[in-house]
Image (cartoon, rainbow, N blue to C red):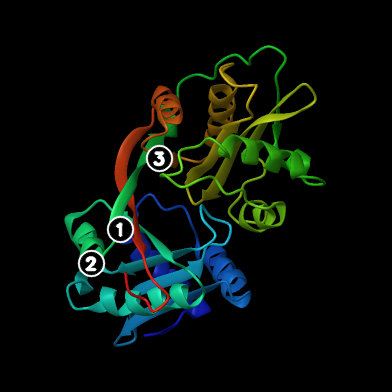
Amino acid sequence: MRPFRATDAPAVLDLSRQVLPHLVDDAAALRERVAALSGSGRAVFTVAELDGVVVGHAAAELDREGPRPDGGVVSVTVGRRHRGRGVGGALLRPMERYAVDAGATVLRAVVQDTPESVRFAERRGYVRRSGTCFQELVLAELPPLPSPPPGVRLSTYRAFLADPHPLYAVEESAARDEPASGFPHQPLSYTDWLAAVWRNPLLDLDLSAAVVLDGRPVCIVTLLASGEAVYSVMTGTSPGYRNRGLAGYAKSAALHRAREHGFRVALTGNAEENSPILALNARLGYRPVAREFLYVKAVSPDGRR
């Protein structure tokens, strides 16, 4: 077990893609995220190495901007050929300790929908809270672009380079009533949104779209891009502008532009309780490809449940 090194990024991504084939990421973006979070002291990243080969990786952070201020986030991934040897447990224990020492009283972990992953989490005291449905769309099968709703102007994120705050305002207002797995919504500060979203090296400013109505953005579609795939991390409409077809039009337009730029596949993940966006995705031709679950565990300061 040792700390993550920048040169580990390709191996870590290869392991992640074994269990997350819908992952849209690249080594440069991963290195940048790890450097930013570990450099600020907000997270720790570890790898498990066997005979010079990375066979697992883990991370932990205190999620100060998440659903609850005392929440810790832990993650563990082990290559399929090296499971059942205690690697996962050896990675998880120091991650839990880091989060608890940082002040966490509730630990959250994302668990893949496989029997072995579920058993691993539940044997260690984690309890299932909610599910996420991952979906895939082959862009060649994208339905025709609908006509724009009356009065709508579509803009790319690049138009907001000088001042992206209006995009943040839409995302924050739209996120307030998104399904939150039983946790109350905790707003993301503008500073942290800039770091996590706007400065994400995978954010495509020319594909991400905003519907401008009444002189301001009221609906957004945020797309990450890597290789032949785009990933929708946010589709949201400000309250007061919903049920006008804005999200459907904006997402369809963004995906059509992605196809024109040579992208082949669109991916996304949504809470299973989020029926409006799941219905929208179905109309666009997305199909389910994977599931994962949010698991939680309450812990005391000494690390016990």
Residue identified by numbered label 2: 80
Q: Position of residue 11 (x, y in %)?
A: 39, 72
Q: Are marks 2 and 1 in contact (CB under 8 Å)?
A: yes
Which callout, 3 or 1, points at the residue further toward the start of the chain?
1
Under mark 3, the amino acid is: Ala
Give the residue at x 59% y 73%.
35
Residue identified by numbered label 1: 19
Q: Position of residue 296 (x, y in %)?
A: 35, 58
Horizontally, residue 80 falls left or right of residue 261, namely left
Give the residue at x 63% y 41%.
172
Q: Residue 147: in sight, yes or no?
A: yes
Residue identified by numbered label 3: 271
Quadrant in the picture for residue 54 = bottom left
Picture quarter with the N terminus: bottom left
Q: Residues within 10 Å of mark 3 (few under 14, many from 20)?
A: many
Above or below, comparing residue 205 to residue 253 in the picture: below
Question: Please, what secondary structure does the residue beneath circle 3 have?
Answer: strand
Give the residue at x 23% y 60%.
117
Above or below, comparing residue 93 to residue 105 in the picture: below
Q: Are marks 3 and 1 in contact (CB under 8 Å)?
A: no
